[in-house]
Image (spheres, grey):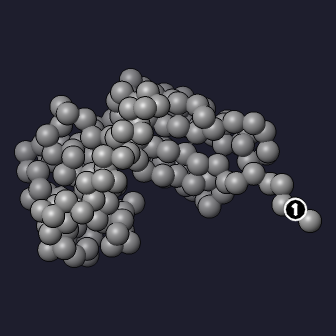
Amino acid sequence: MNDTRPARPVLDVWCELQCPDCDRAVADLRALRERYGDALEIRFRHFPLDKHRHAYAAAQAAEEAYAQGRGDEYVEAVLARAGELGGRGEELLLEVAGELGLDAEEMDTALIDGRHLLVVDADQAEGRAIGVTGTPTYVIGGERLDGGKSQEGLRERIEEIADRLLAGGEG
């Protein structure tokens, strides 16, 4: 017997770690994780903006945190200190890593050797290709939702789409 249930829906969140709007989006992402659990896959995607000079390094640091098994926690912790990132840069990125029990020395090495550059570049290129111009931007069920202007009503819209997808409706 074939299982005809659709694969679990995916919410791609195009974000950057020096973005105050992305920090404000964290509460919505927590609520979505709580509501849907494993039924909705939430993927953090990198879209460092040129206007934030430490965003690219922060994206690489986040990838190293994911490689060390604590990516979501690291992303949330850096976003909570996005205002500090502009002035402190890599020093803050390494400090947060240490606070979370990550291997800060390995993170420093990753920032130097650029082992995560391709992932960050690929995310950014894909984002541009689908029309992402700012952060946060959400993509679910083929629909792009721009959170850079306002977060108002976005979580509800994401929930409507997720509920439809989970019920087997078209995206």
Image: 93 above or below 121: below
Measured as percent of width and height from the top left, residue 128 is found at: 38, 32
Q: What residue type is labelled 1?
A: Asn
Residue depicted at x 22% and y 52% = 58
Q: How many marks?
A: 1
The residue furthest top is 149
Residue located beneath label 1 in the image: 2
Q: Badge 1: few (under 14), some or many (20 or more) residues near its Cα, within 10 Å? A: few
Q: What secondary structure is found at the residue carrying circle 1?
A: loop
> Is 103 or 36 nearer to us in this picture?
103
Q: In which quarter of the image is the C terminus?
A: top right
Image: 138 above or below 65: above
Q: In the picture provided, is 70 more to the left or to the right than 107?
A: right
Q: In the picture provided, is 144 more to the left or to the right than 82?
A: right
Residue depicted at x 14% and y 69% = 109
Measured as percent of width and height from the top left, residue 132 is found at: 41, 30
Measured as percent of width and height from the top left, residue 163 is found at: 71, 42
The residue furthest right is 1
Residue depicted at x 19% and y 59% = 114
> Is 109 or 156 nearer to us in this picture?
109
Residue depicted at x 26% and y 76% = 101
Do we see residue 159 in this rendering? Answer: yes
